[in-house]
Amino acid sequence: MKNSYIIANWKMNPNTLREAGNLVAGIAKNIRIIKNATVVIAPPSIYLYPLQNKVGKKIKLAAQDCHFESDGAHTGELSPRMLKNAGVAYVILGHSEQRTAGETSAEVNEKIKAVLKVGLIPIVCIGETKRDTEHQYLSFLETQVKETFSGIPLASFSKIFIAYEPLWAIGVEANREATPEESIEMVIFIKRVLADMYTTKVAESIRFLYGGSVHPENAHLFLIHGGVHGLLVGRDSLNLKKFTKIIEITNGLN
Ligand code: 13P
């Protein structure tokens, strides 16, 4: 049986711990009989500790970011070790909303190394801001991949998830939805860049996710035709009914 990964990126939602707890409890209840999907929830970090008791065995927790240093004078930041101690298993890194706010690929690179060091699993977001007919976005992506993944120990790649998240397909402001064909093309492209940097074996050992306007109507298309092992879901992961549906669809495909 195949296993797929459904990751919920709650971003800066919801506003109360009560809502967060209810949502997690609802998901945990709805997925009791799910066998072929790993469900990961990335809530705002303030909810990580209290949600530990609500997730049960089926749901894993993720953080939405972290700092690359292990401690020190970094106001407002959280270290990978703190997240691990709070029961976190995965960390989303290099999300386009962080990159837009100024995060560089070099910083994402430091964070990947720091997260791997404490035994957490990095979910690294990669994606171009826009598409152009001259295919400049390919060289943009190539540079982003090279800078983000430079100097990572070869054996670590089998632990890493790469989420292909084209900026233009994310959120309510999305220009349009990406197609599964665009997803698989970019997965192949990213693998080719990594195969050139390292080896084909390394590139093939990485697990890929697609993210950007995933909903119950297109989830199966990305899973079947998108060349990915799972999905990174934003808005619809905050809707119990829709998120449950996405998990059920995924489970049914495996
Ligand atoms: P949406 O699903 O809301 O487009 O967000 C995608 C995303 O950014 C997940 O990390």
Image (tube, rainbow, N blue to C red):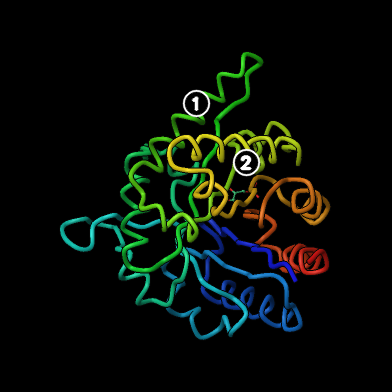
Report x, y in % for residue 84. 37, 73
Q: Quadrant of the C terminus?
A: bottom right
Q: Quadrant of residue 136?
A: top right
The residue depicted at 60 percent of the width and 37 percent of the height is 166
Amino acid of disc 2: Val
Mark 1 and mark 2: Cα distance apart in space: 15 Å
Out of 151 and 161, give the one closest to the viewer: 151
The residue depicted at 67 percent of the width and 42 percent of the height is 172
The residue depicted at 49 percent of the width and 30 percent of the height is 142
Kindly state the secondary structure of the residue where label 2 is placed.
Answer: helix
Q: Is residue 156 left or right of residue 57?
A: left
Residue identifier under label 2: 187
Residue identifier under label 1: 140
The residue depicted at 35 percent of the width and 77 percent of the height is 85
Out of 103 and 138, give the one closest to the viewer: 138
Report x, y in % for residue 51. 50, 78
Q: Earlier in the sequence, mark 1 or mark 2?
A: 1
Count neighbours of disc 1 (C-alpha within 10 A) and say few if under 14, some if 14 to 19, many if 20 or more: some
Q: Is the distance from the Cβ of mark 1 to the nearest ligand 1 atom less than 8 Å?
A: no
Report x, y in % for residue 8. 60, 61
Q: Is residue 52 left or right of residue 21?
A: left
